[in-house]
Image (tube, rainbow, N blue to C red):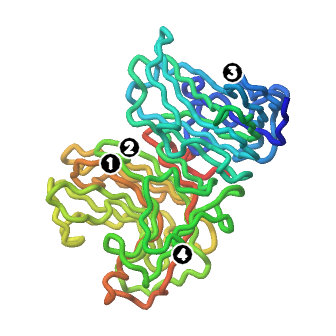
Amino acid sequence: MFRMKHVFMLTPLFISTLGHADVGLGYQSLSNNGGFESWSDGIGLANGWTNESTAQIVSLHKVTGPVYQGNYAQFLEVNLSNGGLAIFSQEIDVSNLQATKAFNAFVYTYPYELINARVFLKLTFKDANGNQLANYHTTNFGSRYYLTSADNPQEWRSQWLRPNGGIPANAKTVKLSLIAEQVTGGTPGYAKLVIDEAHFHTTQLLNSKFGILNFTEWTGKEVFPSASSLQIQDLIRRVPRGHALKSTIADSELEVSEGVRAEVKRSELAQKGDEQWFGFSTYVPSDWVFEPVGPTWGPLVAQWHSITDPGEGSLPPSLALVIKHSKWSVEKRWDNKQITVNTGNTSVNYQALQPIVGLPANILDIEKGVWTDWAFHVKWDWRSVAEGGQGFVRVYKNQQKIIEINEPNMYNNIAKNYFKAGLYDYRWNPVGMQSAAPHSRTIFLDEFHIMDENGSLIAVSPSN
């Protein structure tokens, strides 16, 4: 019998009793003990998990470090050979969930060593008779496929499942499994790993904490020409563990879509009638130089965009968080016409949103050198209240509601809108519009959460 020197850990996740909300994690989880915080004695598997392994388990126990979040995580060491699998799973009743409702699953893993072994997620939906309705795994869906020996050891990695479509009709149960298997026959496989935060949910659209060193939770980046203008780093970060996004732009850069930008993007989020929660944190460095009052433009930090219909040119964002001089500005634009021709703010309805009456005059002042937490609660609509519209925007700064309006907030377009975060400045384009501002800018962003109508302020706020 061989003994490899390291451990592999795997854990799957599933939905637990409906209504269980682990809001401290930044999403409404339906998993049973997906954070591995509940244990009987610290040996074996955490409560709520089932071991279906056919491989030789060397060790299973609770660890206090490394953990991705919380106090504990699950450790596993396993030898893999002759087709044996390490499988950990949960199975739960999903019959009360709306059919076709979008769902996601994810897990964070910390590999010590993987030798001729790979790890992946799997979701299996069944009806009341046990018949399989759908089977998804990260080998054919999701932002990350197999976790293999090519992955850097001793760093947290994420695996996500975001299948197209939603929960199958007539689904009674779903089973989420984290599976480790031997890659090729003949050579024994071995894995040593820690697992944390294994969750299934129908509310979370994005949970990007940059705790892992890639952009897999995002659908794209807009940056040119240097990739270094978007960096994941750990010198300045919102929470004690993990990383944060560093966005840098310079007036020497070439333009991308009518401006200088270094942004991440999440596509196909919402259309008219959808209600969503957005949360993220910003850090304006202490060396940021405020511009003198005068220009009406300023760098955008976050923006919500429509995809234009045929016959329309580019349109400014329908909602944006902007830095103007020494203050934050929340701005929205909208239009109920089927075809919008953009000739500036006069061609669309534009409004700089004002703080709630009675709040301090400095409520939108920018504090440099500290993190600021933001939450946006939005119901999207291009119609006015008189037209039956139900649109609203509610903005929270450091968990305090500072803006609330019940008005239209998007364009009358067919496709779903999208969200972008990171610096974008259009005043450096064309060249003649440069001001006396610094020739480069840097900002840090972290703790992104996007949820559907079942979200909350607590759920999209940073979890320390």
Image x and y of residue 438, in percent: 49, 87
Image x and y of residue 28, in percent: 55, 37
Q: Which residue is mark 2?
A: 275
Separation (CA) of disc 1 from disc 4 = 31 Å
Q: Residues within 10 Å of mark 2 (few under 14, many from 20)?
A: many
Residue 388 bears which disc, if any? none
Separation (CA) of disc 1 from disc 2 = 6 Å
The answer to whether 151 is drawn above or below residue 446 in the figure is above
Q: Which residue is mark 3?
A: 52
Who's the residue at 57% across and 64% down the image? 245
- The front one of 329 and 302 is 302
Residue 380 bears which disc, if any? 1
Give the quadrant of residue 41: top right
Under circle 4, the secondary element is: strand
In the image, taking residue 173 as reference, residue 312 lies left or right, namely left
In the image, taking residue 250 as reference, residue 274 lies left or right, namely left
Instruction: Say which of marks 3 and 2 sits in front.
Output: 3
Q: Disc 1 or 3, which lies upstream in sequence?
A: 3
Name the kind of residue labelled 2 in the image.
Glu
The answer to whether 375 is drawn above or below residue 232 in the figure is above
Who's the residue at 60% across and 36% down the image? 120
Q: Disc 3 or 2, which lies upstream in sequence?
A: 3
Who's the residue at 51% across and 53% down the image? 279
Q: Which residue is mark 4?
A: 442
Separation (CA) of disc 4 from disc 2 = 31 Å
Instruction: Say which of marks 1 and 3 sits in front.
Output: 3
Separation (CA) of disc 3 from disc 4 = 49 Å
Under circle 2, the secondary element is: strand
Q: Are marks 1 and 3 in contact (CB under 8 Å)?
A: no
Q: Residues within 10 Å of mark 4 (few under 14, many from 20)?
A: some
Q: Disc 4 or 2, which lies upstream in sequence?
A: 2
Give the quadrant of residue 388: top left
